[in-house]
Image (spheres, coloured by chain):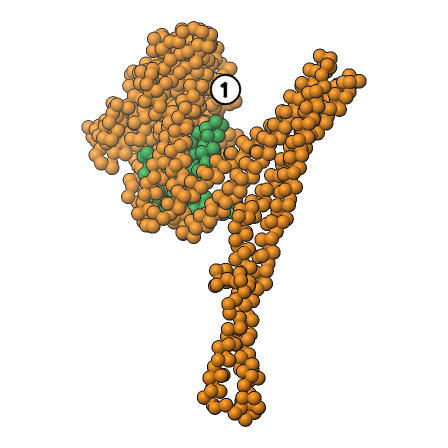
Chain colours: A orange, B green
Amino acid sequence: MYLSRLHLQNWRTYADAAFDFSEPRRGRPIVLVGAMNGHGKTSFLMSLYLGLFGRYGLRHCEGLKNINTDDVGSYRQAVAKFRRNAADPEEPTVVDITMTPLPERDSDEPEVRVIRRWFFTGRNEPKPGDAFEQVEVHINGKPVRLTGLDRDFIQVAQERIERTLFEAHVAPAFFFDGEQAQKLIETAGEAGIKRAVEVMFGTKVIADVAERVSGYVSRARQNIGGKKKVSERQQELEDKLKERDTLNKQIAKLQADHQRIERDKEAKEQERERLHEEFARMGGANADMAVLQEAYRHTQQEQTDAERALADVVRPLGLALAMKRLALPIQNRFRQEELREEWEGLKRATLDNKEKVLSAALPEPAENDPLLGNIAPAVRAKVRDRFLIALEQIYNPPKAGTAEDYWLGHVRGEARGKVLNQLGNVFTIGSARAKSAAKRLRDAREGVEESKASVERHTGLPEASRQISEQLQQLSTDTADASRKLGALENEIRSLKAKHANLQAEVGSIQEELARLGPEQQRLAVAERVGRALEQIEQALKPTTTLRLEDYVTKHFVSIADRRFRNARIHLETGNPPEIRFSDGRPSMLLESNSGFEKRAFGIAFTLALAEITRRRLPLVIDTPLGNADSQYRLRTLKALAGFDLDQVIILSHDEEVDAELAAKLKSQVNQTFLAEYIEADNLSVVHPNRYFSR
Amino acid sequence: MKVPPCFEDAEARRIIRRICDENRVDDTLLKDLCEIALEHSGSAKRFGIDDQIADAVSRFIERNKED
């Protein structure tokens, strides 16, 4: 985007003058605007601030910064300062600015024209109230309707201009005065630098967002209630997720350790193979030694395998082994209850048939009883009762070992049989496998001892083979050690993975619960997370922003300043004035102790750095960038400005600064020239396009 | 979309992404919120910021459902 037109009416010395800028050409960004002191350079610069942003530009405009921007009266005074003294009271003061996109670069940006008019009374004093100012905004040639609820049209216009062009606070990085840039060194220390970089780099926006989100969270909480449950569950979820992350890291670390040990073990095994071959090549007695070593290695391997096999057997038997202590009493109890069930069954069967048994012993009626039919009925009844009592006594007492009642009464019949069978397995299958694995380990250990002793017995070998033998022993010990470590690591990884799976299930369940809590609460939960993230980002970006600013300032400063500063780096530490440090061992120096032009070079470098940080392609407008610099400095500064990656660099200069000779040297980078000339007789400045100071 | 320049700086972007991941949000949501804050910042105050924040968060939730 470039400044294509600036039309000024009744603005300082300009009665009615226009600068029509042609479209920038690649490699020729510079536009020279020459004007002697008092002929209209500064008023050109100020017209951009006040024309584009009105009262909102005041706070960023270096020359007007000290005016209290909240005071509408101050703004009127500032504008009145720039009104042409000889203006006709009937005519307003007008600044009319057009910013045009470059077709190849800014195709998605519109052309923006801002026309601001200020009206004055017959005594050339600012008109009161709303009558003072008017603003028009045209986008791509069409006027924008500036109305808004509860807002004045100036505010609506401001919003539209900032949204379409750029924010007012960005302006000082692009429109500035070289002399004031020099003073930046005093004013830009600490707070100034920090503020500038926060705004330009956008970290200030991050802080603003954090504040806005925090406000949203507290208002949303008030609105929806029930916040406690959500935030508690949310916190629980956060904790679980953190725990899960920690577990992931632990597992990853253990797996990495495992891989490392495994690789190390493999390397050692390869080395052992190599030594074995070497050992075997020695022949004779040494070959016997090789055999012994091989046997020793095998026994050690067998010991490692046996240890693993035992661990494998014991791990799944963990529960069964724990049960083993209880298995015998439970088995006994089940058997006692089995007897009781059997006894109760028989007793019940007998009593269920007692009437049949009785009728066989005492047939009824008595006439049918040939044996006891003639006894008295009362006696017969007593006999009958006694018989019944005798029947009930048949199964009393129950068999020895029968349970008196049921403790495990819910497990009966077939189910009891199955449990008894399983309990039997605890003693047989599990213990048999464990016994077998333990025996294998015992045998392997004995094998290792024997083999080791046999190797040790083998003496009198030559030094070389003895050394190899020692190395082989060491390698065997190392690989066995590595195998043990690997086994332990595998167990640990398995256990952590099990924990991880449980945690994952809990996380899922909390997430589902939160999802059920409704969209507003979900939004609240997310906003709380965003708030935390923003606070962390704000802190984390502070060092990066300072570093980035230092990089850019250093780059521009080194390109402008003389060769003494070739190995310099600018340091901007909070609480300290800017400092120059050297990478070639020279002592560092405070920037403020340098010459005026180095201070100016820093100011320009600092401002260019800010412009670069914004990543905007706006016109750069600098009033008197060079001051009283020597010819070398002047050329370097102009070359640095011409080399800055922007399309339009407008330099406002008097005849001693970018003089005719210097302008001629820059010719290949200059796109256009203007000469603003004050005509004393007419009390006004006129603009001559395509002219500049002549030699 | 207007986003602060820190989102275009490689190192700053890495830091932002890492912190976003740790807090299970995404940088699109952050950019949306920055745009809202910029709209409401400084001279151009407007009402309705809470609704805009809620909308941005809802879009984030929707995006994550789709994922």
- Where disc 1 sits, the SS reads loop
Residue at 31%, 15% (x, y): give it.
A186
Of the pair A649 and B64, the residue shown nearer to us:
B64
Residue at 43%, 6% (x, y): give it.
A586
Quarter-of-image position of residue A332: bottom right
Say left or right for A246 vs A486.
left
In the rendered image, the quadrant that contains the C terminus of chain A is: top left
Callout 1 amino acid: Arg
Position of A442 relative to A625 (above/below): below
Q: Is residue A655 visible?
A: no
- Mark 1 crowd level (few <14, some 14–19, many ≥20, 10 Å Cα): many
Residue at 22%, 33% (x, y): give it.
A127
Of the pair A41 and A574, the residue shown nearer to us:
A574
Position of A2 relative to A592 (above/below): below
Query: What is the count of numbered marks?
Result: 1
The x, y position of residue A67, in whole percent, is: 25, 25
Q: Is residue A432 visible?
A: yes
The x, y position of residue B20, in whole percent, is: 45, 36
The chain carrying label 1 is: A
Of the pair A536 and A695, the residue shown nearer to us:
A536
The x, y position of residue A521, in whole percent, is: 38, 48
Of the pair A164 and B29, the residue shown nearer to us:
B29
Position of A279 relative to A393 (above/below): above
What residue is shown with label 1?
A28
